[in-house]
Amino acid sequence: MFPFIYGLPGPHRRIPEIQKKVAEFLQEIIAEHKEVWDPNEPRDFIDAFLVECEKMKASPNTSFTEKSLVYTSLDLFVAGTETTSTTLHWGLLFMVLFPDIQSKVPFCGCGVPGGYNNNNPCI
Ligand code: HEM
C-alpha cells in the first residue's frame, strides 16, 4: 500500500519474505486438501472454497480461484493469529491479577463432568 516504507530500515522489511513463506505453506495445505477432497463433504473453509472454485470455473471474472483461496486463507491466518494470542495473553494476565475471578473460570476438564464440550465452554 505504501511501497516507500520498504526503503526505510526496520523489521517490516521482512514482511514480503514472511508473506511468501506463509503463502507457500498454505499452498501445501491446499494441495493436501485436494488429494482427499470430497465436494459432497466439505470439512472446512478450504474444502468449501474449492467447491465454489469448481462451480465457477467456467466464469472468467470469478474471485473463486486457487490464488484467491491462498490469499483469503492468508488473511484469516494473519487476522486470527495475533488477535487470538493477544486476547489470551491479556486474559491470563488479568486472571493472575484477580485470583477471585480465576477461581470462577473453568479450565479444560477441571471438575466438569465429561470435560470440555459446547455446553461447558472453558479455557
Ligand atoms: C480474540 C480474537 C479476535 C479479535 C479481538 C478480533 C478483532 C477484530 C476486530 C476489532 C475487527 C474489526 C476491524 C475493523 O473493521 O476495524 C476484526 C475484523 C476481522 N477479523 Fe477479527 N478478531 C479476532 C479473531 C479473529 C479470527 C480468529 C479470525 C479468522 C479466523 C478473524 C478474522 C477477521 C477478519 C477477516 C476481519 C475483517 C472483517 C471485515 O471484512 O470487515 N478475527 N477482528
Image (cartoon, rainbow, N blue to C red):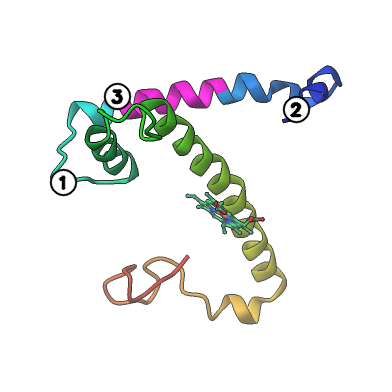
Numbered disc 2: secondary structure: helix
Q: Between disc 2 and disc 1, whose residue precedes?
A: 2
**Residue tagged 3:** 31
Residue range (magenta)? 20-30
**Residue tagged 1:** 41
Point out the residue furthest to the right here: 8
Inspect the image, locate mark 3, and give the three-letter code of the amino acid beneath it: Ala
- Mark nearest the camera among 2 and 1 is 1
Residue at image point 30% right, 46% down: 44
Inspect the image, locate mark 1, and give the three-letter code of the amino acid beneath it: Glu
- The CA distance from mark 2 to mark 1 is 40 Å
> How far from the left and from the top, in percent, is residue 8?
86, 21
Front one among 76 and 61: 61
- Magenta residue check for 29: yes
Residue at image point 30% right, 30% down: 59
Callout 1 crowding tier (Cα within 10 Å): few <14, some 14–19, many ≥20? few
Residue at image point 15% right, 38% down: 38
